[in-house]
Amino acid sequence: MSDLPGIVVNGASGRMGQMLVKLVSESPAARLVGVLERSGHDWVGRDIGEAMGGAALGVPVTDDPLEAMSKAQAVIDFTAPAATVPLAAIAAQARAVHVIGTTGLSGDDIARLDAAARHAIIVRAGNMSLGVNLLVQLTRKVAAALDEVFDIEIVEAHHKHKVDAPSGTALMLGEAAAEGRGVKLDRVADRGRDGITGARVDGHIGFAAIRGGDIVGEHDVIFAGPGERVVLRHVATDRAIFARGALKAALWGIGRKPGSYDMMDVLGL
């Protein structure tokens, strides 16, 4: 068991964090060697298994990233930009793969992650599921095949606790559609409509966000042309798909050259 890759989970008290702790601790391919929470959190100092309401796992929760990663080959991080960005530099020092599922990252945040990736292995994706990454590929191909007569709209739905919009996955899909059309997303994205907006601008890529209940994640890419529509859709019903993808990414990244990777690389797409 001791020769299995060591994995750290950042943000262990969150929904994804707890799911990752459970998945890694039960995995035959990895071992849980550390869990992180922010300073002052009630769980700091407690055994993570007991903090989650179960049996002790022998891994205490810490707010010290260097301590947590001292025996780790990878850290999985579904938290917030303010936590993820500084952790990238620490992961680089520890020579640990940094798997990032955090969304809501700004351009400056991504630039800092790219800088860290010069010395570290970073796998970052707005969505870690196989199905979504296949959808991204399909979106790129369909956008390239259909000209601007077809308007592109991306509609996403998530649970009411999600704090960022559009979702990271919606932005991934938007980037893929823009690449298919040979344009930059930031020049054609339409991320908010309210009131008298005027007619839709040809070539724009529209986004709409729905928030409610416990929706895990639903994404539609609509290509609306005269007399016909093409709709590509992915529906997630279990958040575990993201945890499994993240663990796959962590194991894949061990031993790679420093650089910035995504799930397309992990899945060989």
Image (cartoon, grey):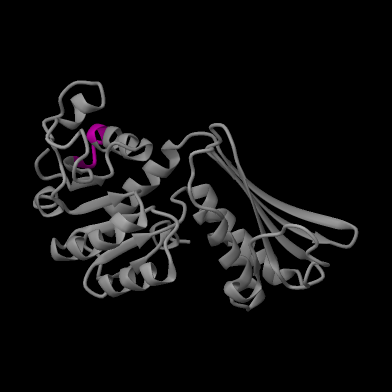
Q: Quadrant of the N terminus?
A: top left
Taking depth in this image into account, of 95 and 212 the one nearest to the observer is 212
Residue at 81% x, 55% y is 229
Note whether 10 is above or below 61 in the view shown: below
Tell me the quarter of the picture where residue 175 sits: bottom right
Tell me the quarter of the picture where residue 189 sits: bottom right
x, y percentage for residue 2? 9, 41
> In the picture provided, is 107 more to the left or to the right than 14?
right
> In the picture provided, is 225 more to the left or to the right than 129?
right
> In the picture provided, is 256 more to the left or to the right than 170?
left
Note whether 213 is above or below 191 in the view shown: above
> In the picture provided, is 228 more to the left or to the right than 92?
right
Taking depth in this image into account, of 201 and 77 the one nearest to the observer is 201
Taking depth in this image into account, of 145 and 186 the one nearest to the observer is 186
The magenta stretch spans residue 99: no
Given the current orientation, which residue lies at the most extreme front position?
195
x, y percentage for residue 237? 54, 34
Residue at 19% x, 45% y is 39
Residue at 58% x, 73% y is 186
Residue at 26% x, 38% y is 24
Write down the region rendered in magenta.
Answer: 25-31
x, y percentage for residue 238? 48, 34
